Amino acid sequence: MRKIIDDKRLLIKCSVMYYMQYKTQNEISNILGISRPTVSRLLKEAKDKGIVKIQIQDFKENYNHFERLEDEIERKYGLLEVIIVNDENDENTLKQELGKATARYLERILKNKDIVGVSMGTTLKEIYKFVSSESKVDATFIPLIGGVGQIGIELHANQIVMDLSRAFKGKFKLLHAPAVISDINIKENFEKEKSLKEVINYIYKANVAIVGIGAPTENSTLMATGYFDATYMKNIKKLKAVGDICLQFFDIDGNYEKFPDNKKVFGIELQKLKNIDRVIGVAGGNEKAESIIGAIKGKYINVLITNYSCAKKINEFV
């Protein structure tokens, strides 16, 4: 696995938290998802490399506007961590950069015996491609939602789970059920099936989750699933929907109750994400700013990986 202590960003972040924010090494360990001995090694290396002397050396030079913005958003919204990547002109390139940053983050925080819930989408499918070939974690990856309609198989949570488990040389479980079930009674019958019930119960044991955050736009993956048409999207906007996680909608304040179709989704209930220790929201593009804000306000995520211009919008939101 890539050596954690080679990450200059992490060296600076750890130093700022310890020397300027006066956090203990135990607190830093919990926030960054690394062991206390690793925190000690990072602080020592920061001194050895001259980043830290009596104070953080060349703070303005080393702690650039990306890291400053990360820190501001973390403080403003009470997030465990924010990671910002460069803006890209091409949407596909941006998704790859988000996938790469997420892969590096997972390499840092995943531990043996972790249970990792995974949602669906075009950004999350990029993550496994950037996991180091040396990575090996005895973690179990599990989908947070069933199979999604008409979109390509590579975007399904089941497929992303398999790709990630292979990349990390871990294990996986699959959820063989549709993502949306039109009749609540049928959904309840599905939930009684032993094989599905076992997987759902396992989902609620997850201590890490990776979720995409959707926006209700005509070009979104939501439309590609076939579950939602243009009329539905127009109506959902009238109810002030700004985003979704696992096909469950919420407004700018994170409220989900006024969207009755959320109950038709087969997978984790949106509000149950709050019970997971570390929920990593991965999304980018200016159109996702309000979606991300709603997800943060609803406390559905506590780690954010996004791009610079989107992060600026999030930070400027009042």
Image (tube, rainbow, N blue to C red):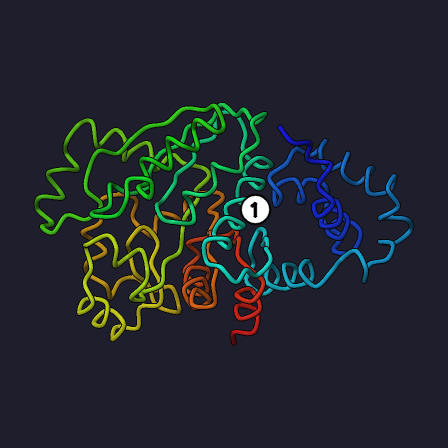
Identified at 33% across, 31% down, the residue is: 202
Compared to residue 21, the image places residue 238 above or below, namely below
Relative to residue 69, is residue 35 depicted above or below? above
Q: Is residue 51 left or right of residue 90?
A: right
Whole-percent x and y of residue 108?
Answer: 60, 36
Task: Give amino acid for label 1.
Answer: Ala
| Figure check: 215 above or below 3 | below
Report the residue at 41% width, 48% height from top. 211
Residue found at x 86% / y 42%: 49
Front-most of residues 138 and 217: 217
* Residue identifier under label 1: 101
Quadrant where the image shows the N terminus: top right
Picture coordinates of residue 215 (x, y %)? 36, 63
Relative placement, left or right, of 137 versus 56 is left
Q: Nearer the viewer, residue 221 or 202?
A: 221
Q: Is residue 256 left or right of residue 19?
A: left
- Residue found farthest to the front: 90
> At which x and y percent is residue 59?
82, 58
Mark 1 element type: helix
